[in-house]
Amino acid sequence: MIPLSFAQSRLWSLRRSGGPDGAHHLSLGVRLRGPLDTGALREAVRDVAGRHEALRTVYEERAGQPFQRVLAVGDAVVPWSVTASTPDDLAADVARAAGRAFDLGHAIPLRAALFDVAPDDRLLLVTVHAIAADGWSLPPLVRDLATAYDARCRATAPAWPPPLPYAEHIAGERERLRAPDDPSGLVARQLAYWQKVLEDLPREPTLPQARPRRAPAEHPLRYDVVPADLERALHERVLAFAGDQRTTVFTLVQATLAALLTRLGAGTDIPLGTLTTGRRAADGAEADAVGRFADTVVLRTDVSGNPCFRELVHRARTTGQEAHDHADLPFDQVVAGLAAEGAATDAVDATLFQVMLVHAPGVPGVRFTGLDAEIWVSDGVVDAVPHGRDGAAHDLTVEFAERHDGEGRPAGIRVLLKYATDVLDRVVVEQLAERLIRLLDGALTQPNVPVGELAVLSEYEREAVLDRWNEHPGHTPDSETCVHEHVERRAAATPDAPALLFEEQRVSYAELDARANRLARHLVARGVVRGSVVAVHLPRGVELVVAVLATLKAGGVYTMLDPDFPEERVTGILGRTGTSCVITSGELAGRLGSGHTEIDLDRDAAAVAEQSSEGLGRTAGPEDPACVMFTSGSTGLPKGIVSPHRSVVGTLVGQRYVDFGAGRVWLQCAPVSWDAFALELFGPLMSGAVCVLQPGQRPEADAIADLVARHGVDTMHVSASLLNLLIDEYPRVFTGLRQVMTGGEAASVPHVTRLTRDFPGLRLVNGYSPAESMIFTVTHRITAADGDHGTVPVGGAVPGKRLYVLDDQLHPVAPGVVGELYMAGIGLAHGYTGQPGLTAARFVACPFGAPGERMYRTGDLVRWRTQSTTPTPRRQPR
């Protein structure tokens, strides 16, 4: 009995773990045109099996341990079949034959099938189980086949020296790896090397848009193949650059693939699996042998620091050389050693990588006596026609083979991307292939340019993510008018229409405008000028709305002091904004100390009433600040966000994410310090609708339910958590509602699914924006179909605003790749009051806009899911 080699043992284990045996086959196709001697060809196949012991071996188990037994030449029966086929059917016929399982315990791991395609046109398919051969076995196999055919055509047996018996390879392997406990021995030294090299190996997925992967033992994976080609000219450039760098084509492809995965969001620490030949010398006895010599190593490629391609090739070359110098230790022993150290903890992690790169050995052209012979070699592929694969261990294998013409000149490189269909979609792999070739082409053209600067996207893709997905043809929001000017227009057009409802008060547009004009004139008389910051320190109610509008009419900038704010927060806001005036009343008056002008609406009522109700004319422009909104400060000092009129107007006027019609009835319930306050107040008032004010400083579910029923509220904005509460406890609220907006936190898929099911006529909108881009920058109308996804999309940019998903180098990332979200356009704030350094860091130059344009760096990680949609961002502390 002969034990299995370590490489065979690994394959035996994979074979036993599940999945059809066809996952581990190697196929050699020889297209033979001309007068074929079929008998001589069949004898030649038998001769090859006789020459190589690995091809006439059976595999058995005894007491749970596998072993192999070499059959005598006369006892080895090579299965042989002859089948009629056609050019149209050939690929499918070959795929079926190549995938048929071997019974390794009773038959040799070799068979041959001859397909008659047409007169004097045949294809010979030789299939070998991978336990008996590897990719480097195919060149000697085809050479031996041609030699034997030539001899049999002359009615003689082939004369060749015996190759190395595979059993000798096994004996030598075990000799080298004896004494594993010897700390100075080869096993200990190489295991120590791999434990150091593979320490803290990244466990994050390395592929874009990959679905979660389950262990193959529990769920054998199905595989498919995407072919791609490098043209002759690019092949020539690859060889020239490799020669110039004194490296190999494999190293160039390794560097390119690592750079691509980095650009696609896999990080800068890229583990790639590959195969070593396992042969001790390229020109020794093992070089001409057929057997399972190849084994796996991990190439951990360092792409950190955004190196140029030339530098990355140098790193890859060093990594490859060191890995091959320590490749005597079988991969299974490396995995076992790492597992013992706690580095590999489950079936998926134990593979150490999910992307494999293989340089398939080229099979030289050979002469078959009297025939025109053409060779195709691939793992399950003949002339690039794939067949399904099952049970393999990796999500993606990138296999490439160089081609040469009859004169030995480069003729292109064939690339096959074999992928797990449960993990990756075909379109994703097709894009991966295109981007790999594009990046390699660019790297060879500009090898001294950092790899982060090289083009990955096509021009069409780049135009899509930068321009087309941000376009809204024929739709331009208003950006040339101030907030209060829109309210004034409504007052002039429909003076008697109701503007505000609060408790028992009903205020028309004409009354609201007149009261705000009087207070604005009083503010000007008390020193408020264009750009003055006016703090509104009032409870929610009609007087608060009048104060906000009056501040804007006077040319001032409002900031809201919620009566529930703690004293230190109020003091901080007053100091950082340089507030010149505070509008207050009642028991709140006199609480904020000195250092500013206080307008007590109770005390100053007579003086205000004496002012004219006529408008003040234009006191501010669209780029002038309208408000200063402060963040919560939960992660540090609250930031005061200074937003111009243009941001508010552009976000609310002329938009389509909800109906801003004059007939709507809105509810204003958000805390007055939130940017949602501007949505709920100015959304209705700038469109001529009714605004219902909820008493109290915080939204209350009971109050909301009452106001919706009493006043016929049909439009509302609530946070996602409050929406969930209303759906669970107050579903009757939605009976009269026609439009609901939500945002600020991730929407609950079960809740919105129930809401869209129970109220199909309701327009439910999910939106997202940091306050630095005002209220909503992206919106998505939620439908029942969104319940099929794990998250509710936040949508695409509203008209006038733009989204950019960028990498660390400010380059747009490919759809499906995680990047940082940047926002530009009409909603952008001026910056942070009193924090010029932070403003400069977060509001940066926009390389995709007009000269001088800025964009806001959100710090949120998102990806384009499909055109104009992104999944819910992972909000970072602000």
Image (spheres, rainbow, N blue to C red):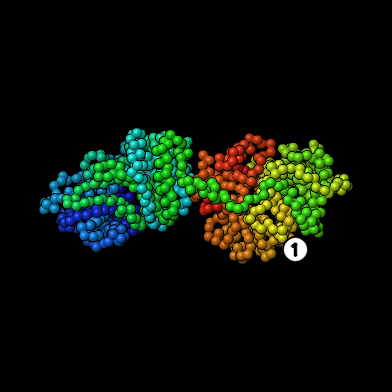
Where's the C terminus, which quadrant? top right
- Residue at the (30%, 51%) spot, across then down: 378
Q: Position of residue 788 (x, y in %)?
A: 53, 60
What residue sits right under mark 1 in the picture?
Answer: 710
- Residue at the (42%, 36%) spot, across then down: 446
Is residue 244 among the parts visible in the rendering? yes
**Camera-nearest residue between 637 and 365:** 365
**Camera-nearest residue between 392 and 249:** 249
Q: Quadrant of residue 495?
A: bottom right
- Residue at the (20%, 57%) spot, across then down: 120
Judge from the rendering whether residue 84 lies leftward or rightward of residue 301; answer left or right.
left
Amino acid type of the residue that numbered disc 1 sits on in the rendered structure = Arg
Q: Is residue 280 above or below residue 496?
A: above
Q: Position of residue 739 (x, y in %)?
A: 66, 60
Residue that protrudes farthest toward the left in the picture:
155
Q: Quadrant of residue 194?
A: top left
Q: Is residue 556 above or below residue 469?
A: above
Judge from the rendering whether residue 220 lies leftward or rightward of residue 407; answer left or right.
right
Q: Position of residue 121 (x, y in %)?
A: 23, 57
Q: Residues within 10 Å of mark 1 (few under 14, many from 20)?
A: few
Q: Position of residue 144 (x, y in %)?
A: 19, 48
- Residue at the (76%, 47%) spot, across then down: 548
Residue that protrudes farthest toward the front in the picture:
474
Total count of labels = 1
